[in-house]
Amino acid sequence: MLFFFISLILIIGVLIIYINEKIIGYVTYPVDYSIGDYAAFNLDSDAIHFGTVVPGAVIKRTLKIATSVDALIDVNLYNLENLAMSKDYFLLEANETEDLTLTLFAPFNAEKGYYSGKIVILYYNPD
C-alpha cells in the first residue's frame, strides 16, 4: 500500500513539472456586457467591454495577441456562452501578432441584465 501512494505522488509530481515546463505564460481578460433597451458604449480600458446591447444584436471586438517567442496559443472562454472567437488554438511565431475577433451574439430572447466572464490565453512552448 505504501508503494502505491509513493508511486502516485511521483506520478503527480512528474505531471506537474511537465505541465509547468510547457506553459510559458498566460493572460486573463475580464469581459462584460449588458443587455438593455438601447445600445451604449463602454470605452474603459480595464476589461473587454461590449457595452450595452439590445436583444438580437451582433457586436464584434478585436483582440491583438503577440509574443516575443514561438508559442502555441490556447484561448479559453469562461462564463461567456454568447461569445464566439475566430480562433481558439494556433501557433504564433516570435514577434508576430494575430488578431482574434470576438463576436457577441445577444439572443432575441435574452433577459436584460449584466453579464460577465473572462478570457484566459495560455502560451505553450511548442517544443
Image: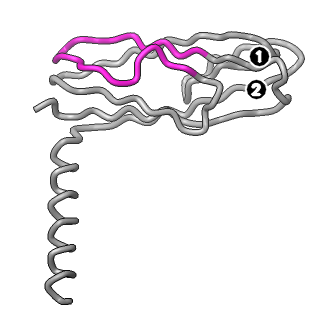
Q: Residue 113 in magenta?
A: no
Q: Position of residue 24 (x, y in %)?
A: 21, 38
Q: Badge 2, how many Cα within 10 Å: few under 14, some, many 20+?
A: many
Q: Residue furthest left?
A: 127
67 or 91, nearer to the observer: 91
Judging by the rendered image, the residue that carries numbered circle 2 is 34
Image quarter of residue 123: top left
Most frequent secondary structure within the magenta stretch: strand
Image quarter of residue 60: top right
Q: Badge 1, how many Cα within 10 Å: few under 14, some, many 20+?
A: many
Disc ID at residue 114: none
In the image, what residue type sits under mark 1? Val
Image quarter where the C terminus lies is top left
SS assignment at label 2:
strand
- In-image side of 75 versus 117 (left or right): left
Disc ID at residue 53: 1
**56 to 16, vertically: above or below:** above
- Label 1 with label 2: CB-CB less than 8 Å: yes
**104 to 24, vertically: above or below:** above
Instruction: Give the residues in magenta.
Output: 84-103
Q: Earlier in the sequence, mark 1 or mark 2?
A: 2
Q: Residue 96 in magenta?
A: yes
In the image, what residue type sits under mark 2? Ser
Question: Residue at the location (68% across, 10% down)?
Answer: 58
**33 to 3, vertically: above or below:** above
Question: Residue at the location (75% across, 11% down)?
Answer: 57
Question: Residue at the location (44% across, 33% down)?
Answer: 76
Q: Position of residue 113 (x, y in %)?
A: 82, 32
